[in-house]
Image (spheres, rainbow, N blue to C red):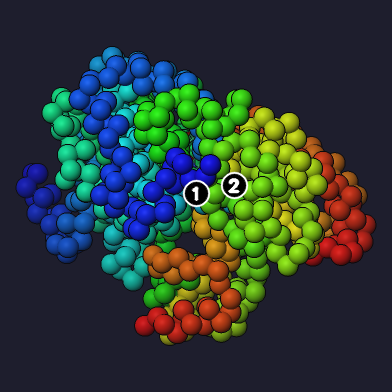
């Protein structure tokens, strides 16, 4: 059971074309919903039943999120798709945009119908020029086929959809920063509450979902929520796209059932390069705490299994590291990233990420002090939960994970001013 | 009064650039012209050898009826806008974790040696500039880089040579 949902057209030639998508039943569900005038509540119910949880990282139940919108409130509402894909290690939404853009479009139209929104935006990161052009072409083809615009297929329902292009800022993946960015401002997160469901894009009720979440909707509607839920395991409905990279033979994107053993995913990805031994895995994007390789080999790729090991499934970005990696160097690079990308709005994040980077950097370069590990613990705990958005936590969690599992390696660096023998 | 503003605006950019910016404006509600600022800055930058001068940012502001300061804020916040001249080919190398563990440092060193420039610098002939970037969402092809709008993946020094030689 692979490539059954978001990548279901991948085996076709030029799978991104409208006719190819339609050859697999694409847009049939939208037609059915519109011609039968399906009750919006029934759609939301089906999505709830599917057990679909947000694929952007936080894992919030999608159906529940949609039910927060007061459908009959007057005025404009919006559907926004998050294709900012900036969490290091994540490269799955790019494949949806490149290879199956119409399924995302169909998912967004259905979402609009379900919550009573007639406009949508897809926020695509600025570097994704090729996927952006592909998506724009798909929009034009969908418009010409009558799937976008006014009075879709004579149903009386209007839906218009556009792509917004980012310009290089990880923080714009945070949902409220993303909304600010569409409004033509700096991408600085808003205080929550109010949540986007009440005060979103242009101050209007808005749902914002990840690319993969929205692209899953047409199949959930076609085959039923139960079908989707049953692909996965308890609390983790469906299949999921995993972007797996690092020191492996065949990195790439794999769409597999939730609950698949990590060892199977690793095998699909060709196993470890040059026969090296697995050392550690970052299972859900760079903010997910690291898990030692041996432990990871016993875990399954679902929310509960990964959470049980003290980490998180996040965006499904799996970074596999072999024994040649120095964990101090890995953490130094990650801390540099979060410090660079902090928007600077709140002090614990702005100052704290700078501290984390400087302290890890001095350990890495042989200037570490004995008190530094306690200092890292302390700074990380002072960021966690004390910031406007979750970037602060995203910066603190990898530090906590590294010190939990590889404290001895950090200590060695401080004592000997170099890496442990046999390491990087 | 409005007519003079309209007249000024048509003088700001070439017809092609105006048409492209207008396409961005049309994507957003009429009262939210400001939403087009990111698209407009990209269009203008692409038509100005890859960078934005203060004068151009002021012109974008006038075109979108925004205060200049609001445009500067956007232009300085996002990393893809360049406020100084860059090379004809802007080489952006990812050095984040997946690329790093697949030896992006070898790629960086190779380019630095070959072109005689470091991060943030432009070659004397103005052909190339080099920039370190964060994860570009293509870690499956690590190590990777972007030049202009194009991604190049699974790099080796030899592949880099071939790519650079293939550019005009
Ligand atoms: C710093 C930061 C970066 C984020 N980056 C992304 C991203 O690139 N893509 C994404 O879908 N969600 C990202 N998120 C999560 C979004 O805020 C939001 O939860 C998500 O888009 C909701 O969609 P979902 O429920 O379908 O996952 C990020 C969150 C934070 C705090
Ligand atoms: S936590 Fe960091 S990134 Fe988020 S709003 Fe505060 S300063 Fe900005
Ligand atoms: S780490 Fe280089 S593209 Fe993701």
Does A67 appear above or below A229? above
Residue at 75%, 44% (x, y): give it.
A296
Decide if ligand 3 comes within 8 Å of the CB at mark 2: no
Does A348 appear above or below A88? above
Q: Where residue A192 sits: x, y (%)?
A: 50, 25
Residue at 79%, 37% (x, y): give it.
A378
Q: Say which label, 2 or 1, has the lower sequence index.
A: 1
Q: Where residue A256 sits: x, y (%)?
A: 55, 42
Q: SS of the residue at dot 1?
A: loop
Q: Quadrant of the C terminus of chain A?
A: bottom right
Mark 1 residue crowding within 10 angstroms, few (<14) / some (14–19) / many (20+): many
Does A85 appear above or below A38? below
Residue at 48%, 74% (x, y): give it.
B129
Lateral position of residue B10 relative to residue B147, left or right: left
Specify the label residue A293 is tagged with: none
Task: Report the chain holding disc 2.
Answer: A
Mark 2 residue crowding within 10 angstroms, few (<14) / some (14–19) / many (20+): many
On the question of residue A327 being in view, the answer is no
Residue, far right: A415
Q: Nearer the viewer, residue A117 or A296?
A: A296
Specify the label residue A317 is tagged with: 2
Q: Are marks 2 and 1 in contact (CB under 8 Å)?
A: yes
Q: Quadrant of residue A205?
A: top left
Lateral position of residue A16 relative to residue A274, left or right: left
Lateral position of residue A243 relative to residue A200, left or right: right
Q: Where residue A191 sits: x, y (%)?
A: 50, 28
Q: SS of the residue at dot 2?
A: strand
Q: Where residue B40 sits: x, y (%)?
A: 28, 54
Specify the label residue A92 is tagged with: 1
Decide if ligand 1 comes within 8 Å of the CB at mark 1: no
């Amino acid at each position: 059971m692979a490539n059954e949902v978001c990548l279901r057209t991948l085996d076709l030639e030029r799978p991104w074309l409208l006719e190819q998508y339609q050859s697999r039943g694409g847009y049939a569900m939208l037609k059915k919903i519109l011609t039968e005038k399906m009750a919006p509540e029934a759609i939301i119910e089906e999505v709830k039943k599917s057990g679909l949880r947000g694929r952007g990282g936080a894992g919030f139940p999608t159906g529940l999120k949609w039910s927060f919108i007061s459908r009959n409130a007057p005025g404009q509402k919006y559907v926004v798709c998050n294709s900012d894909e900036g969490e290091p290690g994540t490269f799955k939404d790019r494949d949806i945009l490149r290879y199956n853009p119409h399924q995302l479009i169909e998912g967004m139209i259905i979402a609009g119908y379900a919550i009573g929104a007639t406009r949508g935006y897809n926020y695509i990161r600025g570097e994704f020029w090729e996927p952006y052009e592909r998506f724009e072409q798909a929009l034009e083809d969908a418009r010409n086929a009558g799937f976008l615009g006014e009075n879709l297929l004579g149903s009386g329902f209007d839906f218009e959809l556009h792509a917004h292009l980012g310009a290089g800022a990880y923080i714009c993946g945070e949902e409220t920063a993303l909304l600010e960015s569409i409004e033509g401002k700096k991408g600085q997160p808003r205080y929550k509450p109010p949540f986007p469901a009440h005060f979103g894009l242009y101050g209007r009720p808005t749902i914002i979902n990840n690319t993969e979440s929205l692209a899953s909707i047409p199949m959930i509607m076609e085959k039923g929520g139960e079908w989707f839920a049953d692909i996965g395991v308890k609390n983790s409905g469906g299949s999921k796209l995993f972007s797996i990279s690092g020191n492996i033979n065949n990195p790439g994107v794999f769409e597999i059932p939730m609950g698949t053993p990590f060892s199977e995913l690793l095998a699909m990805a060709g196993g470890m390069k040059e026969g090296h031994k697995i050392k550690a895995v970052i299972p859900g994007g760079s903010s997910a705490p690291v898990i030692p390789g041996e432990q990871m080999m016993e875990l399954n790729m679902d929310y509960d299994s990964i959470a049980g090991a003290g980490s998180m499934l996040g965006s499904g970005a799996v970074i596999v590291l072999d024994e040649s990696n120095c964990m101090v160097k890995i953490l130094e690079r990650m801390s540099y990233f979060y410090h660079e990308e902090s928007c600077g709005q709140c002090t614990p994040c702005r100052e704290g990420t700078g501290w984390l980077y400087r302290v890890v950097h001095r350990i890495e370069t042989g200037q570490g002090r004995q008190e530094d590990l306690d200092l890292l613990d302390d700074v990380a705990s002072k960021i966690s939960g004390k910031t406007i958005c979750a970037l602060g936590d995203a910066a603190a969690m990898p530090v906590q994970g590294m010190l939990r599992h590889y404290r001895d390696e950090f200590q060695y660096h401080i004592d000997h001013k170099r890496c442990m023998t046999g390491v990087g | 009064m409005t007519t003079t503003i309209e007249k000024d605006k048509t003088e700001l950019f070439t017809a092609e650039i105006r048409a492209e910016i207008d396409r961005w404006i049309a994507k957003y509600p009429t009262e939210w012209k400001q939403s087009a600022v990111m698209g407009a800055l990209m269009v203008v930058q692409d038509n100005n050898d890859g960078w934005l001068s203060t004068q151009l940012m002021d012109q974008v502001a006038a075109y979108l009826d925004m205060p200049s300061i609001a445009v500067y804020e956007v232009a300085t916040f996002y990393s893809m806008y360049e406020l100084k001249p860059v090379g004809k080919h802007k080489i952006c190398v990812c050095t984040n974790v997946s690329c790093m563990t697949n030896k992006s440092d070898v790629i960086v060193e190779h380019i630095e040696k070959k072109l005689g420039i470091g991060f943030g610098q432009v070659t004397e002939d103005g052909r190339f500039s080099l920039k370190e970037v964060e994860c570009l969402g293509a870690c499956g092809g690590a190590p990777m880089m972007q030049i202009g709008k194009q991604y190049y993946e699974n790099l080796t020094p030899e592949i880099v040579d071939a790519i650079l030689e293939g550019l005009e």
